[in-house]
Amino acid sequence: MKRERKAIIPKRDYANKKLIDTTDEKFQDSPGLQRWAAVENLKIAAQVYNEAGSLKELEQKIATTAATGKEAKQTVRTLENLNQYLGRTEPPKNAQEQPDRDNNPSR
C-alpha cells in the first residue's frame, strides 16, 4: 500500500508586498473584502516583522527606507529642474495659472 504524497504548496512571499489600502470605496461596500484585506495586511506585517528579527531592526529599516524615498524624490526634482533649464521639458502646469503680465490691468 503506497502512501500518496501531499502536494507542497509554496508559501507566498508577503514581505515584498505593499499593504492594501482599505479606504477605497469598493472596501466600504463589501465586508468580505474588508476582512480579506485585513487578513492579507496582517500576513504582510507579520512576515516583515519576522524577517526584521526585532522591533528596533524594523524601525531602523523603516527609517532607512523613508530616507531613501526622500532622497529619490529630491533627485527626481533636481533632474526635472535641470531638464527644464536645458529646455528639454516643459515646466509642470500649476494649479493656479499665473496672470499674463501684458494683459494685467492692475499695472
Image: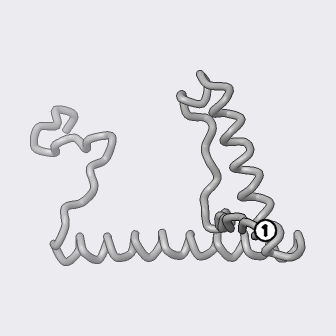
Q: Which quadrant would the C terminus be assigned to in this image?
A: top left
Residue shown at 75% from the left, 70% from the top: 2
Q: Quadrant of residue 5?
A: bottom right
From the image, tell me which residue sits under label 1. 1
Residue shown at 60% from the left, 30% from the top: 27
Q: What type is the residue that disc 1 sits on?
A: Met
Q: Quadrant of residue 8?
A: bottom right
Q: Considering depth in this image, is 78 or 72 the residue closer to the camera?
A: 72
Residue 100 vs 105, above or below: the answer is below
Q: How is the protein colored in the picture?
A: one colour
Where's residue 44, x and y in %? 71, 58
Where's residue 78, x and y in %? 39, 75
Residue shown at 59% from the left, 76% from the top: 68
Residue 46 vs 51, above or below: the answer is above
Q: Which quadrant would the N terminus be assigned to in this image?
A: bottom right
Q: Considering depth in this image, is 3 or 63 the residue closer to the camera?
A: 3
Residue 93 vs 26, above or below: the answer is below
Q: Residue furthest top?
A: 29
Residue shown at 16% from the left, 45% from the top: 101
Q: Quadrant of residue 95?
A: top left
Where's residue 53, x and y in %? 86, 76
Q: How many marks?
A: 1
* Secondary-structure class at tag 1: loop
